[in-house]
Amino acid sequence: MLKPHWAALVLAAIVATVGLSAAMGCSGGSDPADSGALTSALAATGPASPELLEILDQVADLRGLPPPKSVRFGVVKREAFPALLDALLTDSDREGFAKTTTLYRLLGHLGRDQDYLSVYRALASQAAIGLYSPDHDTLWVIDDRPGSTFRLDEMPPEARAALAHELAHAVQDANFPLADLKRATGDDLDASLALASLIEGDAVASQALYTARYLSATRPALGIVLGQGATPPGVPPSIARELFFPYTSGSEWVQAEIAGGGPGATDRLFRDPPRTTASILHPERRGESSTPVQATLPDLAAPLGEGWERESGGGFGEFQLRNYLQLRLPGIPAATAAAGWVGDRYDVYKRGNESVAVIRLTFSDDGQAAEFAAAHDAFLATGSSVRSLKDGLAVTASAAGPTTVSFPRSGPQITFVIGSSEAVAIRAAALLRGG
C-alpha cells in the first residue's frame, strides 16, 4: 500500500502499518520523528517485567519461534495516545498519507474536506488498545485506570489476550524483520495490504492460541484487539473495512493456510509473503501463483502539461476493487464482480488542486471482465450524476464529485479514468487513447 499504511499497521495493518496498523494497534516504520511526545513516551518505558517476559515466552513457544532478546514496555493514557501515534509517523509516512488522500478522494472513499490521516487518527484514538513499535522494540499499552503503577495481574482476561497479540508482533519482528518486509512492497497498495493481512492474521492466531491455553476469557478474542463499540464518527465505512480487513479476513486466511500446510505454513509465508489480496480472499486457491498479471499504462505526466506530476501508482488489487464497488453496491454483488481480478495497474497524477487516476484492470477471461463492466456501469448509474457519450467514451459527471470516463471493454481488460473535474478526466482519457 502507500507508505502511510506502514507506520501505523504494524502500528494498524501496515497503511497502513503506520496508517492501518496504528489504528488497529501495531506499529512499524523507519526514522521516527523525534518529538516531545515520543521522547516523553520513550522516557517512561523500561525493561519488561518478569511477568510480561513470561507472557512473551509463552506466546513465542505457542508460535514455535524464539522470543526477542529484549522488549521495553510502557503505559500511555488514551488521551495521549494520538500524540504518540503522530510522533511515530515519519515524513515519508505523512507523504504516503497525502498520496492516499488524493487517490481515495477520487475513488469516493473520502470527501473533498476529508483526509486519510485525520480518519486514521479518529479510529486509532478510540479503537486501539496498544501498539508495538519495531523501531524501538517497545510495547505500549493504553491504561486509563487511576494510579501510576501498571499491574499485569489486575488486567482482565480480554486485555491480557490483546497484550499477547501485541507481543506476537515482537516475536514476528525478531524472526522476520517487519520493516524489511514492508520496504519490499514499495508503494503497492495490494501487496502492502496482503502483507498486513499476514502480520495481523498471524498475531490474531497467536492470540487465540494464548487465550485457549492460558485464559478463561469468554469474550471473542478479536474484539479487544479491534476495540469495542461502533466505528467513530467521521470514519467512512469503506476505510473501516480496509483497516479491519487484515484482522478478520487475514486471520481466516492464516488459519486456512495452517490447516492446509501444517504448523510451519506461517513461517513459510513470512519468508515468501503473499503479493495480492486475492490470495487472502480466496484461500481455496492455496498453492496457486499469487503473482498478479502485469498491466501497463503510459506515463501521462508530461502530456498532461506543465506542472503535472505522477504522485503514486502500482497495484490496486481485488480487495480495493471490491471495496470501491461497495461504496454504492451491496457487498455480495461487489465481491462477485471483483472476483475475476487477476492483475492491474493504476497511476495518480496531480497538479495543485487537480488530480486524475488512470486504472487498468485485467480479469481471468472475457466473461469475468464483462461481469465487472456491468457492475461498474450500475455503480456509476447510482446517485445524482449525468452520463453522456463523448468521442466513443462513456462520461459520468457528478456535480458534487469526480468525473469517470470509461473505455470500451477490450477482451479481459477494462480501463477507466477518474478526474477531479470533467475537463481533467476527458483530457487524461484522450491522452490515454492516443497513447
Image (cartoon, rainbow, N blue to C red):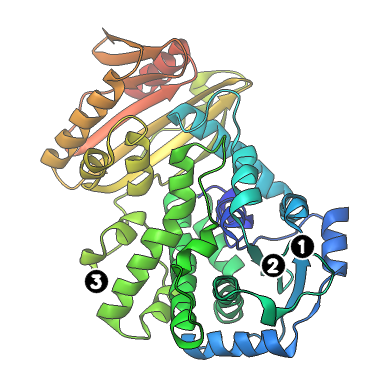
Which is more N-terminal, label 3 or label 2? 2
Please tell me whether mark 3 or mark 1 is closer to you in this view: 1
Q: Residue at x 43, y 40 (%)?
A: 238
Which is more N-terminal, label 1 or label 2? 1
Determine which residue is flagged by label 1: 76
Give the tally of numbered discs: 3
Which is nearer the eye, 434 or 339? 339
Task: Name the residue type under label 1.
Answer: Val
Task: Name the residue type under label 2.
Answer: Val
Mark 1: secondary structure: strand
Cβ–Cβ below 8 Å for labels 2 and 1? yes
Q: CA distance from mark 2 to mark 1?
A: 6 Å
Determine whether 248 is above or below 170 in the image: above
> Is any part of residue 64 visible from this angle?
no
Left or right side of 230 for 260: left
Determine whether 315 is above or below 257 in the image: above
Q: Residue at x 21, y 47 (%)?
A: 340
Q: CA distance from mark 3 to mark 1?
A: 43 Å
Which is nearer the eye, 216 or 283? 216
Q: Residue at x 45, y 48 (%)?
A: 242
Please tell me whether mark 2 or mark 3 is closer to you in this view: 2
Task: Name the residue type under label 3.
Answer: Gly
Left or right side of 253 for 94: right
Q: CA distance from mark 2 to mark 3?
A: 38 Å
Quadrant of the snapshot with the C terminus: top left
Determine which residue is flagged by label 3: 287
Mark 2: secondary structure: strand
Which is nearer the eye, 320 or 226? 226
Determine which residue is flagged by label 2: 141
